[in-house]
């Protein structure tokens, strides 16, 4: 196995350090564009605060709408950090190393906006204080807030720990950076000297945190599922909601991970570090998760449809043949079945473009699916809606809701972009360490040692 000498290691570090603060392709378009959407959403939220939730389409019957649907979506994709950092670590997958920091950045951004969505839905954010002071332990809402907060803190720590050696490298190598940055890096690096005992303690801490954060990550989405499963409503009165949410979350997280590394690969010219191997492996994971999610969908909708109980019938008819049927069948066919077919063909799965296409379809289907979980069940309660005021028995999101929802999605993307600006996109010390131990093939990178060695020997 080819070993890395110090000069080649330094060249790899220089190549990855070049991404720090670098403007990637199309950044001059996307950052202002997403910022404008966020500003528009802020204005819409201020309008909602001044006028009350009456400016939305949420009423007595449909009291949850786009905001809670987006809460479930953000909580879902936040599980990608646990999948890449914890599940793949415990499974011993070596190819995960170039992806760890990217996954954790996506998790931080997603869980931040997941915590913000209930505040939007409350109408009066100051009442969040009463949830803390007067919360009831029997309420799943209190569990959800505690789980999201715990997962966010754990994700911040997990993002920071593997960053310490890279911060020390930035402290030592980026000497032309502004003084305040070098001071900040020195403080955050915590006197890291890359000694053997420091590396041993760091890896032990990361492993312990991995064991701790995995059940927290699963509990976050399970509790979100229990929020509706504990409510006696058609479509929600099911014991399958926990695994249904968790595997749907993992599926959506894998899809958005593929899309983000595809953009970073092009934007920062990281083709040697984020290769077709990573897309192939993530494509296999996405295929397995999507196939299992199809199985869960058959159980969730097929079994009640076979029995067609009186209370479940209105919801199922609405999904199968009614107002929401187009969205429902789009989710099932375009968001699940077609990606399974694409990813099942090895030739297509080995092509980055097809893996990315499948991920777009899966992610779009997952986003719509969260809406279909929330709204149709509220439109068809056990006691039928009769003699309701005009607009109370239907739900069509208003412009205010659409604007705030769009700004939340834009804010998620913008925060993810900004998290990659101050630090290397890829964890340098883990990649170089595994390259030295394993070589290129196990961790999925290409033409790093060969290119660097050729340049080294030519000099």
Image: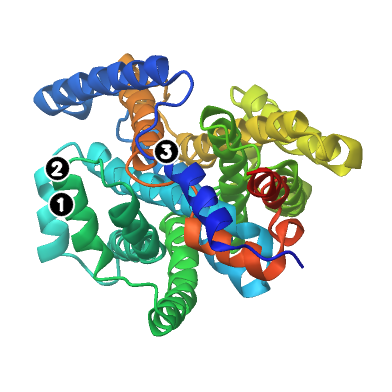
Locate residue 157, reporting x and y percent.
33, 65
- State the residue at coordinates (38%, 16%): 28
How far apart are the alpha carbons under marks 1 and 2?
6 Å
Image height of 3 relative to 393, above or below: below
How far apart are the alpha carbons under marks 3 and 1?
19 Å
Q: Is residue 212 left or right of residue 113?
A: right
Locate residue 245, reporting x and y percent.
56, 54
Mark 1 sits on what residue? 128
Classify mark 3: residues with Cα within 10 Å, few (<14), some (14-19) or many (20+): many
Image height of 155 relative to 283, above or below: below
**Residue lying farthest to the front in this orientation:** 459
195 or 110: nearer the eye? 195
Judging from the image, the colouring scheme is: rainbow
How many numbered circles are shown? 3
- Would you identify the image quadrant in which residue 366 lies? top right
Mark 2 sits on what residue? 125
Mark 3 sits on what residue? 70
Q: Secondary structure at mark 1?
A: helix
**Which of marks 1 and 3 precedes in the sequence?**
3
């Amino acid at each position: 196995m080819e070993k890395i000498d110090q000069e080649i290691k330094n060249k790899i570090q220089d190549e990855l350090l070049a991404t720090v603060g670098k403007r990637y392709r199309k950044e001059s378009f996307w950052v202002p564009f997403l910022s404008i959407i966020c500003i528009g959403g802020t204005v819409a939220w201020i309008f909602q605060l001044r006028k009350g939730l009456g400016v939305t389409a949420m009423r007595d019957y449909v009291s949850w709408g786009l905001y809670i649907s987006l809460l479930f979506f953000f909580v879902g994709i936040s599980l990608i950090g646990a999948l890449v950092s914890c599940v793949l670590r415990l499974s011993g997958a070596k190819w995960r190393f170039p992806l760890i920091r990217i996954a954790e950045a996506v998790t931080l951004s997603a869980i931040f906006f997941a915590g913000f969505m209930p505040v939007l839905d409350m109408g009066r954010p100051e009442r969040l204080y009463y949830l803390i002071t007067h919360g009831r332990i029997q309420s799943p809402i209190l569990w959800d807030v505690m789980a999201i907060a715990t997962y966010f803190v754990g994700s911040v720590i997990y993002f920071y720990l593997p960053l310490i050696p890279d911060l020390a490298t930035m402290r030592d190598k980026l000497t032309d950076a502004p003084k305040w940055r070098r001071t900040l890096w020195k403080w955050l690096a915590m006197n890291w000297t890359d000694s053997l005992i420091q590396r041993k303690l760091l890896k032990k801490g990361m492993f312990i945190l991995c064991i701790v954060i995995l059940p927290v990550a699963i509990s976050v989405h399970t509790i979100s599922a229990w929020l509706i499963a504990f409510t006696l409503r058609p479509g929600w009165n099911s014991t399958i909601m926990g695994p249904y949410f968790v595997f749907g979350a993992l599926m959506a997280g894998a899809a958005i991970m593929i899309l983000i590394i595809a953009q970073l690969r092009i934007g920062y010219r990281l083709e040697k570090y984020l290769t077709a191997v990573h897309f192939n492996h993530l494509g296999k994971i996405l295929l397995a998760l999507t196939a299992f999610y199809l199985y869960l969908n058959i159980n969730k909708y097929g079994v009640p449809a076979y029995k067609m109980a009186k209370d479940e019938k209105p919801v199922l008819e609405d999904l199968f043949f009614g107002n929401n049927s187009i969205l429902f069948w789009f989710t099932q066919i375009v968001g699940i079945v077609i990606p399974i077919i694409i990813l099942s063909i090895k030739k297509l799965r080995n092509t980055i473009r097809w893996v990315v296409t499948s991920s777009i379809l899966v992610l779009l289907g997952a986003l719509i699916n969260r809406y279909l979980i929330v709204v149709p069940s509220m439109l068809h309660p056990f006691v039928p809606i009769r003699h309701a005021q005009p607009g109370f028995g239907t739900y069509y999101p208003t412009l205010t809701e659409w604007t705030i929802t769009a700004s939340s999605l834009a804010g998620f993307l913008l925060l993810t972009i900004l998290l990659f600006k101050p630090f290397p996109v890829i964890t340098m010390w883990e990649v170089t360490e595994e390259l030295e131990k394993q070589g290129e093939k196990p961790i999925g990178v290409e033409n790093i040692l060969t290119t660097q060695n050729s340049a080294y020997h030519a000099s």
